[in-house]
Amino acid sequence: MSTPIYQIKNPQAEQKRLEEAARILRQGGLVVFPTETVYGLGGDATNAEAAEKIYAAKGRPSDNPLIVHIADPSDAEKYAFVPPLYRDLAKAFMPGPLTVILPKKDIIPRQTTGGLDTIAVRCPSHPVAHALIQVFGRPIAAPSANLSGKPSPTRIEDVREDMDGRVDLMLDGGPCEIGLESTIVQLREDGSAVLLRPGAVTRDALLCVLPRVEIAPAVTGELEPGQVALSPGMKYRHYAPSSPFVLLDGPEEDILSFLRREQQKGCAVLCYDEEIAELESIRLFPVGPKADLAEQARRLFTRLREADHSGAPVIYGHLPVMDGLGLALYNRMIRAAAHTVRTLP
Ligand code: AMP
Ligand code: MG
């Protein structure tokens, strides 16, 4: 059975539809909703059965915790033990694309946190997400609304492809503004902070508020066998198309000649806009201007899905620089490519 989709342009004018969504959540059902990062697959964060339904709908291992979405940054105090640094982060970055890991209180069941005694909290800025949490009156647990292992959905078409018939309702709020999942930072009791997942709130931005920010090894590297990921999601294959995805590094001219040769064999290319004129137009998926990392973030997951649908035997992309928003692009792309980098010439 296919899932109904409600387009919500103006949450104030569409209270009835939001109330219907909230009713589904209250009954333990699942509602997909837009956020400024990617689409979320939401259930009642205080209901263990709803959390289990989320794992089932995504085909996600149940030790991979969900993010708890709140309407106001101060609501975190109801669900977590909140240190003063959280308030500083909230003042600087919330509502917005930042998730903070804190020690959890008992009201949140362990099913929601993948068995951990910490909780991930985020206060989204998207008006539809915000309105839905408010009308519901409780926190919403939500991971990204993709099937486990697929690229996160940033448009309702992508959500439909993965979630049609698996959830009770989908709210369409148009394409997501940021396109990559939230930055995740863990605040430890000793006052230290660890960046578990890079996102639109960059490490430099965090350093304006936090004295030190360690980068978790899984952000840029591959975990050694037996090494434990601080953020459980980091240990799973993720964001991946089904064709092999290979990242290219080296001088621009060498990359272009390599790509021209490979295009004869039918490869797909995630190219910069400046390269469109230099390459064959077939199976070419522009991600944005080379210097515009925000645009690349916005388009990455959709372009990966499109490249995958093109049926190409292999997909190529550029290895991003690890600076600013580039660190988030690097983290998603290196994992989608299962760490396959080809250095040219
Ligand atoms: P998603 O946004 O779909 O990738 O799902 C949420 C991600 O948040 C998970 O994959 C985890 O890596 C991370 N996360 C959620 N809760 C915690 C937590 N308590 N500790 C560490 N990471 C978490
Ligand atoms: Mg995800």
Image: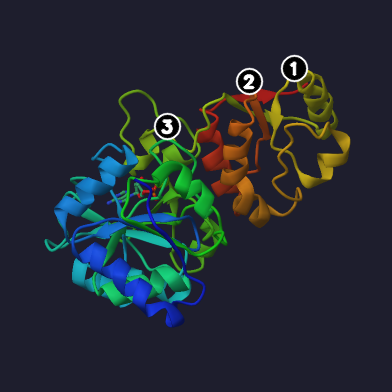
Residue 294 in the image, given as x and y percentages of width and height: 64, 56
- Taking 41 as reference, is 261 above or below it? above
Query: Does residue 84 show up?
Result: no
- Distance from disc 2 to disc 3, alpha carbons, whole Å, reads 19 Å
Q: Which structural element holds mark 2?
A: loop
For the point 53% across and 28% down, the residue is: 339
Residue furthest to the bottom in view is 12
For the point 20% across and 46% down, the residue is: 52
Q: What residue sits right under mark 3 in the picture?
A: 237
Instruction: Single out the mark in the foreground, 1 or 3.
Output: 1
Q: Quadrant of the N terminus?
A: top left
* Amino acid type indicated by mark 2: Pro
* Amino acid type indicated by mark 3: Arg
* Amino acid type indicated by mark 1: Lys
Kindly identify which numbered label has been placed on residue 273.
none
Q: Which structural element holds mark 3?
A: loop
Q: Nearer the viewer, residue 212 or 251?
A: 251
- Taking 194 as reference, is 63 above or below it? above
- Taking 165 as reference, is 210 above or below it? below
Kindly identify which numbered label has been placed on residue 313.
2
Q: How is the image coloured?
A: rainbow
Residue furthest to the right in view is 277
Question: Does ligand 2 reach within 8 Å of label 2's beta carbon?
Answer: no
N-terminal-most mark, 2 or 3: 3
N-terminal-most mark, 1 or 2: 1
Residue 26 appears left or right of 231: left
Kindly identify which numbered label has been placed on residue 265.
1
